Image: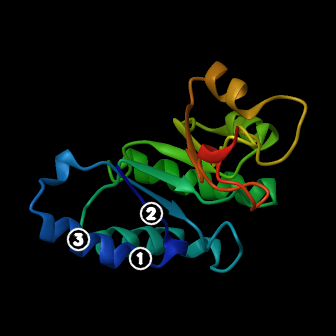
Amino acid sequence: HIDTAEGYANEAEIGRAILDSGVPRDQIFIATKLSSVPKGLTDIAHTADVFAFQLSQLGTDYVDVYMLHTPPVDPGQLRTVWQFMESFYDQGRARALGVSNCDVNDLKTILSFARIPPAYIQNLFKIYKPGEQIPGVEEVVAFAQANHIAVMGYSVQTEWPHIMAPLEDP
């Protein structure tokens, strides 16, 4: 399982490492994220170009999961970006779609219009902050599971509040 993102600026290096490894592509799970468009750094009209560039950097013609790195604030933009992502899914260039850094309200918004619902959510999920990026009434993990969305955590063993490693916590 390789997890990367446009925003990490390491997709070319990951692509070279995959090539150098000699491991067949169908034996590697690649998850990557669209970073610049939802953050407003790249015009939404260039979403397909960004994705094509990501695939070329990774040296593959598809990814196993393509995620929004963070949802755009504007629901109209969220819908438009998701429609681009659905087209990548339809073309077989993204085998599943997902989201990252989302709360329950973001998931509800996406589910209200998605033709292809997210199969995957990747959020901060550590011992001291289990599953919730933003405090809310409903728990993100429970909502995701109830809607058949796989949950993946990042930063699972980071220190909190930067004084004690989780494995040292009595």
State whether residue 14 appears in this view.
yes
Where is mark 2, residue-wise?
A: 4
Find residue 48 and name its label: none
Residue at point 47%, 79% (across, down): 9
Q: Is residue 124 visible?
A: no
Asked if residue 28 lies left or right of residue 77, the reply is left
Residue under pointer 3: 17
Left or right placement of residue 92 versus residue 134 in this view = left
- Percent x, y for residue 106? 76, 44
Q: Residue 36 location in percent, x, y? A: 61, 74
- Check disc 2: other Cα within 10 Å, few if <14, some if 14-19, many if 20+: some
Q: Earlier in the sequence, mark 3 or mark 2?
A: 2
What is the C-alpha distance between the residues marked 3 and 2? 13 Å
Hey, what amino acid is under mark 2?
Answer: Thr
Relative vertical location of residue 152 with respect to residue 41 in this rendering, above or below: above
* Corner quadrant of residue 32: bottom left
In terms of depth relative to the viewer, which is nearer, 159 or 118? 159
Q: Which mark is residue 10?
A: 1
Circles 1 and 2, Cβ within 8 Å, touching? The answer is: yes
Q: Tag 3, which secondary structure? A: helix
